[in-house]
Image: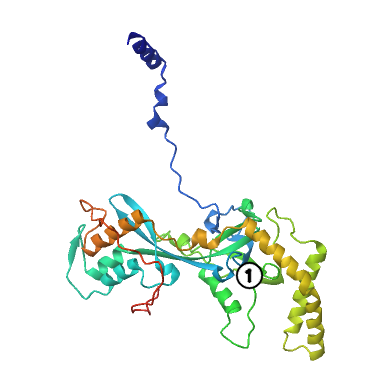
């Protein structure tokens, strides 16, 4: 005992009070997704961007694991309870309006009960309460290869996810899925023939009374696709294809343009078609190589940003939150737990909508 006590006393005598663990806790850092590419003009280096815009060049490309899922929708609800903040994916991501969370919100939103409920010192009708509590976020994601970026050079060459702004999505839809049957769809995401997207992202207005507008009203209307086909490159920024292959890609693109030009003569169209046909086999090999290369180096867009079925514990927590909200109580302030003993199943298969299909989300 005496020996142990002596050891403790010796340690105490030599102990540096600054070594108390609570004084040396690492600073908490917000999570940043290393595979998500962001072009925030408020974070540009003024030396790089004198106009204050975010400038870069990217290639939007197909998801190599499932081309039909090259634009992935994500919908999630933010919730607070006594244990803090949590997020739950919504089946609205799958365009399933039978999502239990969405239906729980609808039950309040379409309530005709005009009774005023006093909650946390404020009064709400059921509709007002539902709209106040159900905080839904939605986004669409695509896969890009960053071709040029002086602001974030560490992203150049990488295949990463990017939130797809509506302005760019509208351009993609108009060109790849035209409503006019006389216009041919443009293959903007093609690994070999797609064009570069020039990012020119502008900050919102300077408004002293509402400074949040500078971040909230970022615009993408100046972003535009170049006309020339630009093949993907290697992740180290070097060409993936040699000069002869690049020439073949350019030759095919040029002849395809002539073959589909309504103003071209029949003879020129015929010559262009023959030129394209002669290049098909080598281009197939290049395309196969490009697909394999992207699969080896890119994230799986659906796994990263698509819908994820909530784990049973998380789903039980979400159900308890919805039950408490339906009872016109704040889950962050109620005492006790309303978590159900047996969580109700969260249906895995999209079903037909039960009405209100005209809602804008």
Residue placed most toward the observer, 186 or 58: 186
Where does residue 71 sit, x and y in percent of width and height?
A: 54, 68
Does 25 sit left or right of 125 as displayed? right
Which residue does the image show at 23% across and 64% down from the upper left? 326
Q: Which residue lies furthest to the bottom in this view?
A: 266
Q: In this view, does 320 lie to the left or right of 53?
A: left
List x then y, in percent, for residue 154. 63, 50
Colouring style: rainbow
Q: Quadrant of the N terminus?
A: top left
State the SS at label 1: loop
Q: Position of residue 284 (x, y in %)?
A: 73, 70
Quadrant assignment, res 64: bottom right
Please name the residue shown 19% across and 73% down the image.
Answer: 114
User: Can the viewer see residue 52 in this picture?
Assistant: no
Relative to the observer, which residue lies in front, 299 or 200?
Answer: 299
Q: Quadrant of the C terminus?
A: bottom left
| Residue tagged 1 | 189
Residue closest to the eye, 45 or 209: 45
């Amino acid at each position: 005992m005496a020996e142990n006590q002596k050891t403790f006393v010796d340690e105490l005598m030599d102990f540096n009070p600054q070594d108390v663990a609570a004084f040396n806790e690492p600073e908490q850092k917000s999570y940043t997704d290393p595979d998500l590419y962001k072009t925030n003009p408020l974070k540009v280096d003024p030396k790089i961007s004198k106009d204050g815009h975010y400038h870069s060049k990217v290639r939007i490309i197909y998801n190599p694991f499932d081309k039909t899922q090259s634009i992935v929708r994500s919908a999630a609800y933010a919730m607070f309870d006594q244990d803090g903040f949590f997020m739950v994916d919504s089946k609205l991501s799958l365009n399933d309006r039978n999502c239990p969370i969405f239906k729980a919100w609808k039950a309040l939103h379409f309530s005709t009960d005009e009774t005023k409920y006093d909650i946390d010192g404020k009064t709400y009708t059921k509709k007002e309460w539902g709209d106040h509590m159900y905080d839904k976020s939605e986004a669409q994601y695509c896969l890009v290869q960053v071709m040029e970026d002086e602001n974030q050079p560490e992203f150049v060459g990488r295949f990463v996810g990017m939130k797809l702004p509506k302005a760019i999505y509208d351009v993609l839809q108009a060109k790849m899925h035209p409503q006019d049957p006389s216009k041919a769809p443009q293959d903007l995401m093609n690994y070999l023939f797609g064009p570069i997207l020039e990012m020119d992202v502008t900050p919102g207005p300077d408004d002293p009374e509402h400074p949040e507008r500078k971040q909230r009203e970022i615009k993408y209307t100046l972003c535009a696709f170049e006309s020339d086909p630009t093949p993907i490159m290697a992740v180290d920024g070097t060409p993936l294809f040699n000069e002869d292959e690049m020439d073949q890609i350019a030759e095919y693109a040029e002849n395809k343009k002539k073959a589909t030009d309504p103003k071209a003569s029949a003879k020129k169209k015929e010559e262009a078609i023959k030129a394209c046909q002669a290049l098909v086999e080598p281009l197939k090999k290049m395309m196969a190589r490009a697909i394999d290369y992207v699969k080896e180096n890119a994230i799986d867009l659906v796994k990263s940003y698509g819908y994820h079925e909530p784990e049973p514990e998380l789903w039980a927590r979400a159900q308890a939150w919805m039950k408490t909200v339906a009872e016109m109580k704040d889950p962050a302030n109620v005492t006790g737990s309303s978590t159900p003993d047996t969580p109700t199943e969260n249906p895995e298969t999209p079903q037909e909508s039960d009405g209100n299909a005209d809602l804008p989300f």
